[in-house]
Image (cartoon, grey):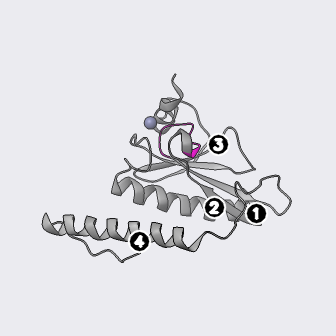
Amino acid sequence: MASEWVFCSIVAGTEPSRQVMENARAVAFLDVNPAADGHTLVAPKEHFPDIWTLGDDAASSVWRLAVEVAHRLDEVLDPNGMTLFQANRAAGWQDIFHFHIHVVPRWEDDALVRPWRPTPGVGERLDDIAGRLQRAVRNGNDMLASTGKGESTLPL
Ligand SMILES: [Zn+2]
């Protein structure tokens, strides 16, 4: 089975998994390659390859289930912390092309490391990127308004 379809089979129940929770549109199951004890994946039941294709209802259901999973993991495993991780496209470290969120319990002495070292950005570059995003958001709202589907969105 091609790896991009394995989550389709898991959420359909035709591929075995250690499912821990579900709601109407999403399923949570243990990662078979865990970064830590309790490492759980939350995926929509419908196939969406990545965050750009995820429907609004699935996005809402997946996120609500991830929050519930975080609560249950906190109760059951009593970790010191928790890290959520979500990858898109190969360049974004995605390896299974069915949208999923990683919920990873953390302990003070675990072996995980930050994938980058936070260092201050260049002010001009930050200003430029913020400006481009703000213009895109405004243009997007104009397009929505002109089609009568406008929703107010807080500016960045
Ligand atoms: Zn799928």
| Residue span colored magenta | 92-99
| Residue for point 60% across, 70% down | 122
Q: Earlier in the sequence, mark 4 or mark 1?
A: 1
* Labels 1 and 2 touching (C-beta < 8 A): no
Question: Is residue 70 highlighted in magenta?
Answer: no
**Could you classify mark 3 by the number of other residues whose Cα lies within 10 Å: few (under 14), some (14-19), or many (20 or more)?**
many
Q: CA distance from mark 4 to mark 1?
A: 39 Å
The residue singled out by tag 3 in the image is 31
Q: Are marks 4 and 3 in contact (CB under 8 Å)?
A: no
Q: Earlier in the sequence, mark 1 or mark 3?
A: 3
Q: Which mark is residue 131?
A: 4
Which sits in the foreground, 110 or 71? Answer: 110
Mark 1 in CB contact with mark 3 (< 8 angstroms): no
CA separation in Å, label 1 and label 3: 17 Å
Residue 79: which numbered mark, if any? 1
What amino acid is labelled 3 in the image?
Asp
Of the two numbered discs 3 and 2 in the rendering, the one whose residue sits closer to the viewer: 3
Is disc 4 placed on a helix, strand or loop? helix
Q: Secondary structure at mark 3?
A: loop
* Disc nearest the viewer among 4 and 1: 4
Q: Is residue 56 left or right of residue 70?
A: left
Q: Quadrant of residue 78?
A: bottom right
Task: Give the residue number, with chain letter if any, for mark 2.
Answer: 72
Q: Amino acid at mark 4?
A: Gly
Q: Position of residue 94 (x, y in %)?
A: 56, 41
- Labels 4 and 2: the sequence-earlier one: 2
Instruction: Judge whether 23 appears above or below 19 on screen.
Output: below
Cα distance in 3D space between marks 4 and 2? 40 Å
